[in-house]
Image: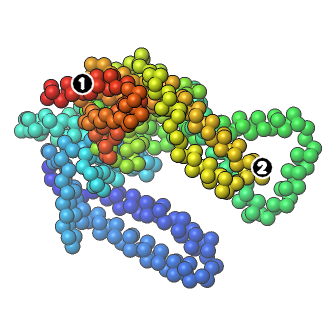
Amino acid sequence: MNHEKRYHPLLMLYDVWRLIKNMFFLFLFLFVIRANSDFWLFTYGRFAIVLLFLFILLAIPMRWLTSKFKIGNKNLQLNRRFLITSSRTIPYATIQHTRQKATLFHRMFHMTSLTLETSTTGGNSTIIFHVLKQEEVQEIEKYIREKKDINISEHNDEENLLDPASENVQTDKDKANRVVHFSPTAYDIFKASLASFSFIAVFPIAWSLMSNFIQLFSIGGKVEDVFTDILGSWPWWVMLIFLILMILVAIAAGGVLTIYRYGKYEITSDFEKIYITQRFSERTTFSISKVNVQAVHIHQSVIKRILGLAEIKLICAGSTGREDAEVNRLYPFLPVQRAYTMVEEMLPSYQVTSVMNRLPKNAWWIQMLKPSWFWIIATGFLYYVKPDFLGLEVPWWILSILMFILIMVSRLLYFYQTRYTINKSMVQFKTGGFNTSVFLSTKNKVVELQLTRHIVQQKLGLASIVISNHAKPVMQTKINNLPIGWCEEFSRWYMAKELSK
């Protein structure tokens, strides 16, 4: 396909659906909840919201008529011709990763959406096709995947690339070559529901529904009388059983919420890309090019450490914004050992080292004795406000002491848990107090290295290292109080890369 074409007509229906969904609560508030209000803001607000709705509704078919796109051999072109003609060209080489998402709307019409993340900066770094045929998506992804081959042998392969039959065969072949790294079991889903605390969300939802029900039927006094009778007549062991049952119901409901979000989740990869697929609530597919992975973070919170879980996040060149946090984040409740082995399977150049160096004893003094400005400011605030929690008159100095103990315990954990090492091609750090994070990067993905030393570190023979990797914004990883001898060795290790260029 190398000619301009209009977007699918279903795009207009999709835009109307989004318009209704986005403005539904405004209409509900102005025309139902505040329908009888004569306040001028609500009166003119109803008039304004109707005009805005009609204006956007009329603009939808006009935007569809004036917009076209072209899938070229080397780039995508997005054109719009109305009062002002605009054209945008996106070379396939700048596209870092893709994401497919099929909502209920898309599945009803056998369509999908496609998001392209590029290496450019600014608000135009993401291109979204809200409604596309699956064949068009496959064609775009095929051009992205084979852009180098197209540049070399364009005249030989053009007919094969445009042939739907050969395209389907190639797509099936690509899927057959994928390796499945992880798909959650029922036990994994259960642990994920505990680690995500999704069962806790059941309580405020139930309380909100019950409050609305009481207000709607004006039965607040009656409900209070019923609860008073129950609390006064039921023995303690019945209340305990009732409480346990409520917790079990909440955990079950939390499991349902987790299944809704992560059901049929799958992580696969082939030679070039990593694929993340979710096919339960919505059919969503992310693809991340392996060559764009700059570093790997393996993170564990306190609850995940207790449950033996971890989360992998891939730091990619061209990552931007909140969407990328979702795209580059793998299943966030992986068994910790599986997380480490999966990194090596998906990215063979990343070899996780189990034995790492610990911080020297000199670093303990700096870690424990440095002033905590957060604690000093918080203590001053507590002294001034003297807050009481839930009606309990707790002296401010007790809260300050508790905060100080938490800070010291966190620093102590940071000292004992921090690790560092390098090998022929990899650098690996582990840092954190209550939460821990393992950083992995290959030598050729480190774009900048900084060594810093303040006066106390100079006296104790220590230094800090800051590593920079390509991302948007540039990602910096810092580890403090390393032996100066190892830092100089690390600098020579990094400079060997620069000299080899």
Q: Do we see residue 173 in this rendering?
A: no
Q: Between marks 1 and 2, how big is the CA–CA gap?
A: 58 Å
> Which tag is nearer the camera, tag 1 or tag 2?
1
* Residue under label 1: 492
Q: Label 2 is placed on what type of residue?
A: Leu
Q: Earlier in the sequence, mark 1 or mark 2?
A: 2
Residue shown at the point (19%, 42%) measured from the top left: 93
* Residue under label 2: 392
Pinpoint residue 248: horizontal percent, then vertical percent. 71, 35
Q: Label 1 is placed on what type of residue?
A: Arg
Mark 1: few/some/many CA within 10 Å (<14, 14-19, 20+): few
- Count all numbered tags in the image, as a single digit: 2
- In the picture as drawn, the residue positioned furthest to the right comes out as 233
Pinpoint residue 373: horizontal percent, then vertical percent. 52, 46
**Residue situated in front as seen by the camera: 369 or 402:** 369
Mark 2: few/some/many CA within 10 Å (<14, 14-19, 20+): few
- In the picture as drawn, the residue positioned furthest to the top comes out as 355
Q: In this view, does 324 lie to the left or right of 188?
A: left
Q: Where residue 326 is drawn, which disc sits there?
A: none
Q: Do we see residue 49 in this rendering?
A: yes
Q: In this view, does 106 lie to the left or right of 169?
A: right
Q: Is residue 438 left or right of residue 485?
A: right
SS of the residue at dot 2?
Answer: loop
Residue shown at the point (20%, 24%) measured from the top left: 496
